Amino acid sequence: MAAKRRILIAGNWKMNGLKKDARSLAGALGTKMSKLKSKPEFEMLVCPPAALLGPVLDAVKGKGIAVGGQDCHANEGGAHTGDTSAALLKSMGCKYAIVGHSERRTDHAETDAMVKAKAEAAHKAGLSAIVCIGETLKQREAGRTKSTNKKQLAGSLPEGATARNTVIAYEPVWAIGTGKVATPAQAQEVHALIRAELAAAIGEAEAAKMRILYGGSMKPGNAAELLALPDVDGGLIGGASLTVADFWGIAQAV
């Protein structure tokens, strides 16, 4: 990994946790971060359900942990019941917004164009967008891994994307919550493909600085091997982000 790309350890809590759980988990992580004697080699991010943003932000205040939203609407405001604007996330104290997660693409029929619009809304609000792409098992078995990721990246990458405002997360859908993990060779192959596509879209210099996360059942036991790959710059972590020991263990693998 190039030294100028700081590892990002991002936890996506999905629809998990109650108020007491959020305070406990975020607070424990904050305590561990505050006890570090030097600046960590990684950046830590937690993305709780929207209703838990307040308690989490309070729990990690001043502890060196960033907070993000799991989604944002493409519009700044309006008649969109149940949705959350990027501007609201920013006003709460968030620094990131995840857009285009495979569960949003599947459960809410989000298209690449919708993901792109959300990422651009995040940028407009002053947030960094974590843009998710990845193939299903059916697509991989059909030999469409490369074409699927190329198409999703091209359609989802926001205008004006830079290494400062955009992170790409490769999440092989077949490895999310299944216990299956892409082999190091499989992960590196797709991450290298993504960086090459980024170079063509935004220039080699900017692509070389942009972080690309792996998001498919990363755990303490496999984190070191995955994070050591040349084009893997962190993890978008689901299940393992829900326990302090596992999430902190992944961070320590850096």
Image (spheres, rainbow, N blue to C red):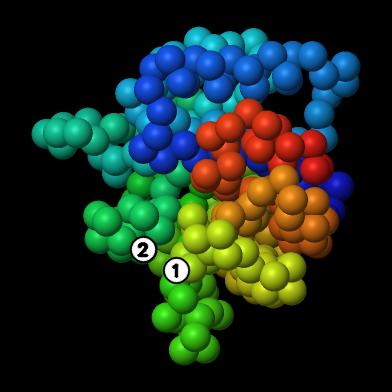
Local crowd size for mark 1, using a 10 Å CA cut-off: few (<14), some (14–19), many (≥20): many
- Residue 220 drawn above or below residue 183: above
Q: Which residue is mark 2?
A: 112
- Residue 208 drawn above or below residue 241: below
> In the depicted view, which residue is nearer to us: 226 or 113?
226
- In the image, what residue type sits under mark 1? Gln
Examine the image and state in which quarter residue 226 appears.
bottom right
> In the depicted view, which residue is nearer to us: 83 or 248?
248
Q: Residue at x 65, y 22 (%)?
A: 29
Element under disc 2: helix
What is the x, y in percent for residue 190?
A: 64, 71
> In the depicted view, which residue is nearer to us: 155 or 236?
236
What is the x, y in percent for residue 170?
A: 56, 61
Q: Residue at x 46, y 21 (%)?
A: 21
Marks 1 and 2 close (CB-CB < 8 Å): yes
Left or right: 80 in relation to 226: left
- In the image, what residue type sits under mark 2? Asp
Local crowd size for mark 2, using a 10 Å CA cut-off: few (<14), some (14–19), many (≥20): some
What is the x, y in percent for residue 203?
A: 67, 63
* Quadrant of the snapshot with the N terminus: bottom right
What is the x, y in percent for residue 186?
A: 67, 74
Q: How far is the residue under mark 1 from the one under mark 2?
A: 6 Å
Left or right: 82 in relation to 217: left
> In the depicted view, which residue is nearer to us: 117 or 72?
72
Q: Earlier in the sequence, mark 1 or mark 2?
A: 2
Q: Which residue is mark 1?
A: 152
Left or right: 202 in relation to 47: right
Q: Is residue 199 at least partly visible in the picture?
A: no
